[in-house]
Image (cartoon, rainbow, N blue to C red):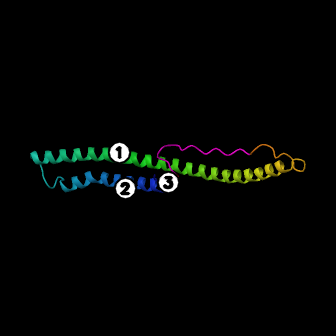
Amino acid sequence: MPTEREFLDAAQLFDDAGDEVSDVPNLVAGAFGPDVATGGQLALEIESLITETHGACDADDSALEELARICRERAEVVAQYAADMRSYNLRLNNYNYAYNRWLGDVREWEHDSEVHRHPGNRPRPPHRPASPADWVEI
């Protein structure tokens, strides 16, 4: 699954593609502008082509902007989950240390309960954070 960096890179690619798509109507208008054909059916068809191209490119640019937004949003989700997992791993390491120490105390107490006091309750393990979505992997 994509990492935070990969989502951010993809968002930039979508933004760049949207910028390029936005330039297409200007390129078409420049290539078939008023100096190429004036008046008549051909000029009307060229103007219609430019209008259609502009509309299609606007739609494509909007779709690319939305994809970039989704990628940035997902990058934030992945980054937060990664931070949650780092915190969990620290707590898990602390738990493992406490558990092993507690287990050693239990064994000493079981071996000689008159010399060693009862070690108390077993430490509780931390809860692993749930993955926020199927597409998030760390």
| Residue denoted by label 1 | 63
* Mark 3–mark 1 distance (CA, rounded to whole Å): 21 Å
Choose the circle earlier in sequence order: 2 or 3.
3
Left or right: residue 120 compared with residue 81: right
- Residue at the spot 63% in from the left edge and 49% down from the top edge: 88
The answer, for residue 36, to whether it is visible in the render is yes
Q: Residues within 10 Å of mark 1 (few under 14, many from 20)?
A: some
* Mark 2–mark 3 distance (CA, rounded to whole Å): 19 Å
User: Residue 99: which disc?
Assistant: none
Choose the circle earlier in sequence order: 2 or 1.
2
User: Which sits in the foreground, 30 or 98?
Assistant: 98
| Residue denoted by label 3 | 4
Left or right: residue 120 compared with residue 69: right
User: Residue 16: which disc?
Assistant: 2
Given contact means CB atoms under 8 Å apart, are the residues at marks 2 and 1 in contact? no
Q: Residues within 10 Å of mark 3 (few under 14, many from 20)?
A: many
- Residue at the spot 48% in from the left edge and 54% down from the top edge: 3
Element on which disc 1 rests: helix
* Mark 2–mark 1 distance (CA, rounded to whole Å): 13 Å
